[in-house]
């Protein structure tokens, strides 16, 4: 360790071990920083205008900057620049006691980790000193390069841009009276979803305003000037107001610049100390005003305008990434650290303030650090449909969903395509569509539990975020459009695998499948989402479910409701289909992974097994069975319902998951289902969900018949025919396999 000064330093706090440089106290340090401004037993600064509060908030901002740069520099990797321009705002919100912060910007991770270190939350994962933090950054079971729910005090992950607002809105909905700031960067302003999602949410939930978007407007994206860098302050303010924000608080560092910096975006760390304090005062007072407005029932946005990379090793896009040569021993890194170096007593002061802010360390006070009470559901009103009769699986699901909503007032159903169009009008009738205009004809009312913005991202985002924050939810979608909302579902399910707490699984149901969409053509025939879900099965906590009928979809949903920290996607039809499984068989299929729906009484010419995912596709399979039996073959039709459980344990990363599911079908039961002379996988969608069957099967002859592509046709039969999913083709393929 070296020091930026030659003087004897005061005692260095134990947690500060590993700090490269210490500096001298700022002018007036003894006057404004003799004691922590957040006193013991308090959770925020006394007033935003208090000079000591401003002074110590600025110390906090520089401490965050310093740690962010040193930690990333220790690995020559990471992203210090974006967070650096938000440091005054982040410190201000913390000092005001608003510590339930989320972000859509994964690149802000080192800054968020720095805040969690300074408030002592990271001690729970064995990080007690700056040296510990340096070693654990970007390492396995350490501080991931981007935000992770495995890190104590972090409320949510940060995946693709345009997601963070969902977490803030979900938190606000579940926790009235608590402010949820969410930082958004210039890059996020280029996404089509964030502001429209907030506008839709506010229309549906006008009383829920306790989320606060914080735009970190710094003029740059990852590698160039941001598109919004060309906007004036007036245009930016008007843009937010056009999306329903009644109060927009903008603090521009340019207004305080006494260093003669050119351009619209400036670095406040180059100001004189007096102007730095003036800028910090404006940010602190602006953040306080915005927070009070949001908590007071007004949709509010807070904007801090400051050059990207303010106070670190570079500015603009050049501050975004550190590369292998950007290490602590390089002059441009060490000099930047020395410019931000604080004296030991300042570090001690900042830690005291941050540990007290918000009522204690985030690991003890963040809303996501503990489960929220869930309303008991009791027994679901499942119906036992007789085998042979025709029922609509989606409608059967709707009855159970309605019961969940009536039992749990916090339960939210999201759908961009309409429940009535998906044969689930019963949900709308029971729970009501959330809308400010009451209209009985359309089952809409202001207190409805069905949230229907016409945006799959908004629907998936709200459902996934509510689950992550501890509430029950259900995302419903046309199968063909579900891909538009998949990124946040994927992000959240991965996060759930890492969480240190229990939370309800995020559940989706995708209907109006490709085989049902003949008249709509290929635009509505995109079952590839099944492959996306199946690709995550090996993660250990992701489950695509393929119930075959109305009995089985009830068991599938009941099972999903009883799981924790998982992502469950149910694929089912909105068309009337034969009931093929008894309620007992339905439960067994979901729990075990697969069941035999049919087996021939005899057959001397060999055994053929159909391994099937889907529901409508059983129509040609059962027709093919009749023809094969007439040829002397023994036929077994196996419904592959929960394919994740058909893997072998060592195929799946289940052991590292929160709430691990160690249930896998053993070899004896697997072979009893799938041993045959010929096995043919059949799917009305793609083939990835059948991977565990094809992986483990011992059949010497194998084939796979799946979706090819969409076409405009009149009937499901014609869609299946276009894709070769006919009884004739199945018999022919099996005949060729058998010679």
Image (cartoon, helix red, strand yellow):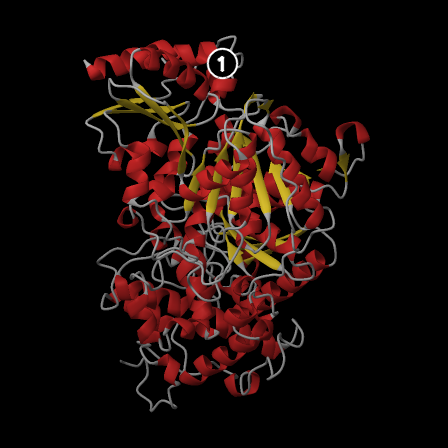
Taking depth in this image into account, of 454 and 333 the one nearest to the observer is 454
Image height of 641 relative to 625, above or below: below
Q: Secondary structure at mark 1?
A: helix
Residue density around tag 1, few if under 14, some if 14–19, many if 20 or more, within 10 Å: some
Q: Position of residue 59 (x, y in %)?
A: 49, 74
Residue occupying image coordinates x 46% and y 68%: 115
Q: Position of residue 284 (x, y in %)?
A: 60, 66
Can residue 625 be seen? yes
Q: Position of residue 527 (x, y in %)?
A: 43, 26
Quarter residue 526 falls in: top left
Q: Position of residue 224 (x, y in %)?
A: 38, 43
Quarter residue 693 falls in: top left
Taking depth in this image into account, of 530 and 74 the one nearest to the observer is 530
Q: Which residue is mark 1?
A: 716
Residue occupying image coordinates x 40% and y 18%: 621
Give left or right: position of 319 versus 463: left
Quarter residue 10 falls in: bottom left
Can residue 244 be seen? no
Give the position of the N terminus as an image quadrant. Answer: bottom left
Residue occupying image coordinates x 35% and y 38%: 535
Give left or right: position of 495 versus 506: left
Image height of 671 relative to 214, above or below: above
Give the position of the C terminus as an image quadrant. Answer: top left
């Amino acid at each position: 360790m070296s020091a930026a000064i030659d003087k004897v330093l005061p005692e260095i706090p134990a947690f500060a071990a590993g700090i490269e440089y210490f500096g001298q106290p700022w002018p007036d340090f003894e006057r404004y920083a003799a004691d922590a401004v957040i006193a013991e037993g308090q959770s925020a600064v006394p007033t935003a205008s208090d000079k000591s509060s401003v002074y110590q908030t600025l110390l906090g901002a520089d401490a965050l900057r310093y740690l962010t740069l040193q930690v990333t520099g220790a690995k020559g990797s990471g992203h210090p620049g974006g967070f650096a321009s938000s440091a005054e705002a982040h410190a201000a919100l913390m000092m005001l006691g608003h510590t339930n912060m989320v972000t859509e910007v994964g690149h802000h991770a080192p800054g968020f980790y720095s805040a969690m270190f300074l408030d002592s939350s990271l001690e729970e994962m064995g990080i007690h000193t700056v040296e510990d933090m340096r070693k654990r950054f970007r390492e396995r079971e350490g501080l991931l390069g981007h935000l992770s729910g495995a890190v104590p005090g972090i409320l949510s992950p940060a995946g693709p841009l345009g997601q963070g607002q969902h977490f803030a809105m979900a938190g606000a909905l579940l926790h009235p009276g608590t402010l949820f700031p969410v930082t958004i960067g210039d890059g996020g302003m280029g996404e089509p979803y964030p502001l429209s999602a907030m506008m839709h949410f506010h229309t549906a939930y006008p009383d829920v305003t306790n989320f606060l978007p914080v735009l970190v407007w710094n003029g740059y994206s990852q590698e160039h000037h941001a598109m919004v860098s060309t906007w004036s302050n007036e245009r930016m303010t008007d843009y937010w107001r056009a999306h329903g924000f009644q109060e927009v608080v903008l603090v521009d560092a340019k207004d305080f610049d006494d260093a003669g910096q050119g351009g619209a975006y400036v670095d406040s760390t180059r100001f004189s100390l007096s102007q730095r304090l003036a800028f910090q005062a404006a940010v602190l007072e602006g953040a306080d005003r915005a927070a009070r407005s949001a908590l007071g029932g007004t949709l509010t946005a807070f904007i801090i305008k400051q050059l990207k990379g303010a106070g670190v090793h570079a500015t603009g896009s050049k501050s975004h990434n550190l590369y292998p040569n950007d290490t602590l021993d390089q002059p441009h890194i060490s000099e930047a650290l020395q410019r931000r170096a604080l004296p030991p007593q300042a570090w001690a002061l900042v830690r005291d303030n941050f540990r007290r802010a918000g009522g204690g360390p985030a690991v003890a006070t963040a809303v996501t650090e503990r489960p929220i009470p869930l309303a008991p559901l009791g027994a679901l009103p499942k119906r036992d449909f007789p085998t042979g009769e025709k029922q609509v699986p989606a409608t059967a699901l709707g009855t159970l969903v309605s019961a969940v909503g009536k039992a749990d007032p916090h339960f939210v159903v999201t759908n961009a395509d309409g429940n009535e169009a998906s044969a689930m009008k019963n949900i709308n009738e029971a729970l009501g569509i959330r809308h400010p205009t009451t209209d009985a004809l359309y089952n809409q009312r202001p207190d409805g539990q069905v949230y229907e913005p016409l945006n799959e991202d908004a629907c998936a985002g709200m459902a996934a975020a509510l689950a992550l924050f501890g509430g029950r939810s259900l995302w419903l979608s046309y199968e063909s459009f579900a891909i538009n909302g998949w990124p946040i579902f994927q992000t959240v399910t991965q996060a759930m695998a890492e969480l240190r707490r229990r939370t309800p699984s995020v559940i989706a149901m995708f209907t109006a499948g490709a085989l049902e969409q003949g008249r709509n053509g290929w635009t509505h025939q995109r079952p590839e989402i099944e492959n996306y879900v199946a690709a995550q099965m090996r993660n250990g906590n992701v489950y695509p479910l393929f119930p075959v009928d109305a009995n089985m979809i009830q068991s599938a949903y009941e099972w999903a409701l009883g799981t924790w920290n998982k992502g469950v996607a149910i694929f089912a039809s909105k068309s009337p289909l034969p009931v093929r499984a008894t309620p007992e068989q339905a439960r067994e299929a979901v729990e075990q992974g697969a069941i035999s729906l049919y087996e021939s009484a005899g057959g001397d010419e060999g055994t053929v097994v159909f391994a099937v995912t889907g529901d409508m596709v059983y129509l040609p399979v059962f027709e093919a069975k009749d023809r094969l039996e007439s040829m002397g073959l023994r036929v077994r039709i196996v419904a592959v319902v929960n394919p994740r459980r058909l893997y072998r344990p060592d195929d799946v990363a289940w052991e590292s998951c929160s709430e691990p599911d160690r249930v896998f079908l053993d070899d004896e039961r697997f072979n009893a289902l799938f041993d045959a002379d010929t096995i043919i996988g059949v799917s009305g969608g793609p083939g990835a969900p059948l991977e565990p069957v094809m992986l483990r099967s011992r059949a010497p002859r194998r084939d796979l018949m799946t979706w090819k592509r969409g076409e405009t046709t009149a009937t499901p039969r014609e869609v299946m025919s276009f894709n070769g999913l006919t009884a004739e083709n199945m018999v022919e393929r099996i005949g060729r396999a058998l010679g």
